[in-house]
Image (spheres, grey):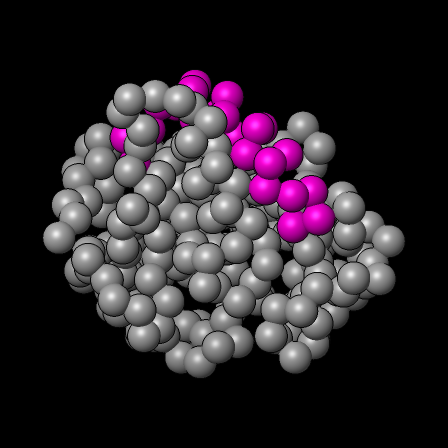
């Protein structure tokens, strides 16, 4: 079984809100243990889709959507006391459009596809990640799983895995991924304290995420705030 006790943790996510939805417990747990934690967000969430009728106008304006979601992220970060954050990429990678079925199919005809995170390719993104890793010097990195249906999450995983290899160090950081439903997990993280922090951070995304007293739903079904986050080590 893998141990998860980072002193310098880097969490790499594709979009604003991923950090809270998928790794809110993980971040809060590491900060509570006095780890230094840096969140790297790869896009500004331009292609997000608001289900809130009052925000539908954002769906047709990538610049306004990016501004709205980026500000929501900055508010969420305040819930994680001590969390460092950076928006990534000299190219300002765009969020990759997905089809309306939710199956992760890319809009290949999108003229902006070469500028998106997925369209840029793992090598390009990894080469930009290398100096970020060198500056922060994490002993542990967390991403979503390559089994996640969104292509940007797959790309984040691929780019981090390649960047770690490009470091060419004898002591590379451990790479953990968030286990998908049905996957085996080596580490389970979350208790009432981290759940409270996750819930507080999630309030920043209330216009995109349906939140109740004990659970949230971002379009895939109800998830309890108390549900632990599961990690497995990439070997």
- Residue 163 can be seen in this image: yes
Task: Find residue 104 and report its image quarter.
Answer: bottom right
Which of these two is toward me, 131 or 72? 131
3 w.r.t. 223: above or below:
above
- Please tell me whether residue 224 belongs to the stretch shown in magenta: no
Determine which quarter of the picture holds residue 187: bottom left
The image shows residue 125, relative to residue 210, as above or below, that is above
Q: Is residue 102 above or below residue 184?
A: below
Magenta extent = 118-140
The residue at 42%/24% (across/down) is 167
Residue drawn where x is 53% and y is 76% of the image: 219
Q: Main secondary structure of the magenta part?
A: helix
Q: Is residue 158 above or below residue 54?
A: above
Q: Position of residue 98 (x, y in %)?
A: 68, 66
Q: Position of residue 91 (x, y in %)?
A: 71, 33
Residue 95 at x, y percent in the picture? 67, 52
The residue lying toward the viewer, choosing from 213 and 96, is 96
In the rendered structure, the answer to whether residue 192 lies left or right of residue 108 reads left
Q: Could you tell me which residue is drawn at 16 percent across and 48 percent down?
A: 2
Percent position (x, y) of residue 146? 46, 57
Residue located 41% across and 48% down the image: 143
Q: Disc count in the image?
A: 0
Would residue 74 be visible to someone looking at this image? no
């Amino acid at each position: 079984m893998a141990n998860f006790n980072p002193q310098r943790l880097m969490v790499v996510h594709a979009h604003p809100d991923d950090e809270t939805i998928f790794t809110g417990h993980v971040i809060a747990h590491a900060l509570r243990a006095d780890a230094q934690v840096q969140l790297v967000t790869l896009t500004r969430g331009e292609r997000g889709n608001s289900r809130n009728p009052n925000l539908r106008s954002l769906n047709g304006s990538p610049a306004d959507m990016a501004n709205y979601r980026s500000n929501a992220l900055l508010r969420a970060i305040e819930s994680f006391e001590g969390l460092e954050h950076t928006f990534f990429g000299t190219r300002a990678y765009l969020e990759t459009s997905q089809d309306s079925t939710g199956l992760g199919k890319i809009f290949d005809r999108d003229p902006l596809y070469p500028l998106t995170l997925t369209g840029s390719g793992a090598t390009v993104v990894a080469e930009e990640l290398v100096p970020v890793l060198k500056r922060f010097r994490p002993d542990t990195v967390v991403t979503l799983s390559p089994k996640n249906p969104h292509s940007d999450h797959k790309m984040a995983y691929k780019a981090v895995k390649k960047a770690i290899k490009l470091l060419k160090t004898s002591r590379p950081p451990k790479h953990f991924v968030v286990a998908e439903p049905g996957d085996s997990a080596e580490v389970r993280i979350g208790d009432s304290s981290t759940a409270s922090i996750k819930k507080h951070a999630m309030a920043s995304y209330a216009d995109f995420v349906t939140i109740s007293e004990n659970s949230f739903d971002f379009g895939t079904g109800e998830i309890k705030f108390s549900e632990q986050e599961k990690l497995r080590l990439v070997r």
